[in-house]
Amino acid sequence: MTTTLPVLSLLETRVLGVLAEKQRTVPDTYPLTLNALAAGCNQKTSRDPIIEASESEVQAALDSLKFLALVVESSGGRVARYAHNIERVLHIPAQSTALLAALMLRGPQTAGELRINSERLHKFADISSVESFLVELAERGAGALVVELPRQPGARENRWVHLLSGAPAIEEQAAAVSASPPGDVTVGEIAALKANVAKLEAEVSELRALIGKLYAELGIAAG
């Protein structure tokens, strides 16, 4: 098994993220059954985006991840159970798995957000510790697993995103930023300016009508 992975689907990364999360948060019921895993994938809290996947869809994602050795199935017992194999396949420490899981479950986040959102999986000493693991994942010799996104307008920190589902459309994001109105002009301010222009135009029309009336009373031909 090489460390070069194919592009994973959203559901496949969600399955991996849930397995990594539940390993730490509910160790008594880990490895997970298909039913528990599907419930974790469809969870309404701590998930972005929120999805609705059937058990058959989750099973298909599991089969794909099993082929890549990222998931292992437990034998024995009446119900099959599943566990992730992220550290062994990707050759990363548990701290990095915690960050990847948070990114797979919640989408792009800043280092500060990742420290908070991964706290139940691993308690990082400070934000600089989170950043050091992110840099390791970004500069990984076998291929980057995360990347730092361009800073959004008005944001104080850059966000990070995982690369297990392919590279994000950074060029499109940059184009959207460059195409936005210059300065800090808001939609509300533009609407207010348009309203003021309309008001001024109405006043000019009224003045023209008044002048025309005065010309008529004085017997002066309008120019």
Image (cartoon, rainbow, N blue to C red):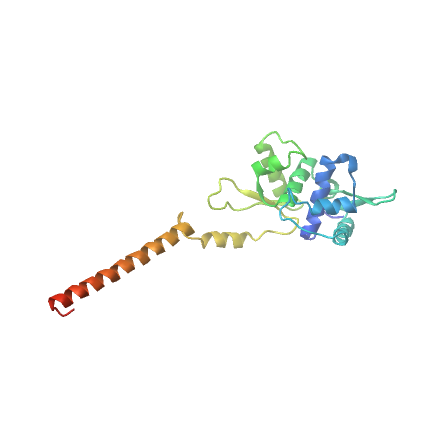
The residue lying at 53 percent from left, 42 percent from top is: 158
Q: Quadrant of the C terminus?
A: bottom left
Is residue 218 in view from this perspective? Answer: yes
Percent coordinates x, y for residue 72 in the rendering? 79, 45
Percent coordinates x, y for residue 210 in the rendering? 20, 62
**Quadrant in which residue 217 is drawn:** bottom left
Quick check: 82 left or right of 211? right
Question: In front: 64, or 131?
Answer: 64
The residue lying at 50 percent from left, 52 percent from top is: 174
Instruction: Spot the residue most to the top.
Output: 125
Quick check: 134 left or right of 1? left
> Quick check: 18 above or below 212?
above
> Quick check: 21 above or below 202?
above
The residue lying at 36 percent from left, 52 percent from top is: 192
**Quadrant in which residue 40 is drawn:** top right
Quick check: 202 left or right of 82? left
**Quadrant in which residue 96 is drawn:** top right
Percent coordinates x, y for residue 161 in the rendering? 60, 45
